[in-house]
Amino acid sequence: MAVSDELGLTAQPVLTLERRHNRREDLRSLARLARRFGVAGIVVGNPVHLSGEVSPQAAKTQAFAAELGTLTGLPIHLWDERLTTREAHQILYEAGHARQEHRRVVDQVAATLILQSFMEKQAVGSRKQGTEKRRNGEPVGDEDNEA
């Protein structure tokens, strides 16, 4: 799990939530963490195939994300997580961490990469929207970013 700073500029790892065999308890744990960190929206890594097609795991993830959205009342954003675990391992390797140590933190690093990617895309979209408004002579205000 990762969270953003208050301005939605940077993502920081928080913890690795160990899944239980009880789906409902997993959902409740995530909802509690969302309240604790005061999140405005939840980004969920979507494990699609490299081809972009929905994998069986992606279908399960999407159903889980929908339940999480219903439980928390927060907007849920599915975000392509292809190759983030591989990238997380590479970052840890380059930082000098032994392969044996990766298992403990690789999911946190991957979650941070997913959230950071989402926020960067949101920021680009906000800048484009502001440019369009200025071009059309519309007032431009501060849009709220979700993270």
Image (spheres, rainbow, N blue to C red):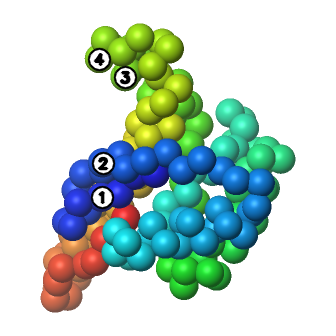
Along the line of sight, the residue nearer the viewer: 71 or 20: 20
Q: Amino acid at mark 4?
A: Ala
Give the CA distance from mark 2 to mark 4.
Answer: 16 Å
Give the CA distance from mark 2 to mark 1.
Answer: 6 Å
Verify CB contact (< 8 Å) between mark 2 and mark 1: yes
Q: Which residue is mark 2?
A: 12
Along the line of sight, the residue nearer the viewer: 93 or 54: 93
Helix or strand or loop: what does disc 1 sit on? Answer: strand
In primary-sequence order, the first of circles 3 and 2 is 2
Verify CB contact (< 8 Å) between mark 3 and mark 4: yes
Q: Which residue is mark 1?
A: 4
Quarter residue 126 falls in: bottom left
Give the CA distance from mark 3 to mark 1.
Answer: 19 Å
Verify CB contact (< 8 Å) between mark 4 and mark 1: no
Label 4 neighbour load within 10 Å: few <14, some 14-19, many 20+:
few
Q: Which residue is mark 3?
A: 91
Give the CA distance from mark 3 to mark 4.
Answer: 6 Å
Helix or strand or loop: what does disc 3 sit on? Answer: helix
Give the CA distance from mark 3 to mark 2.
Answer: 14 Å
State the mark number for residue 70: none
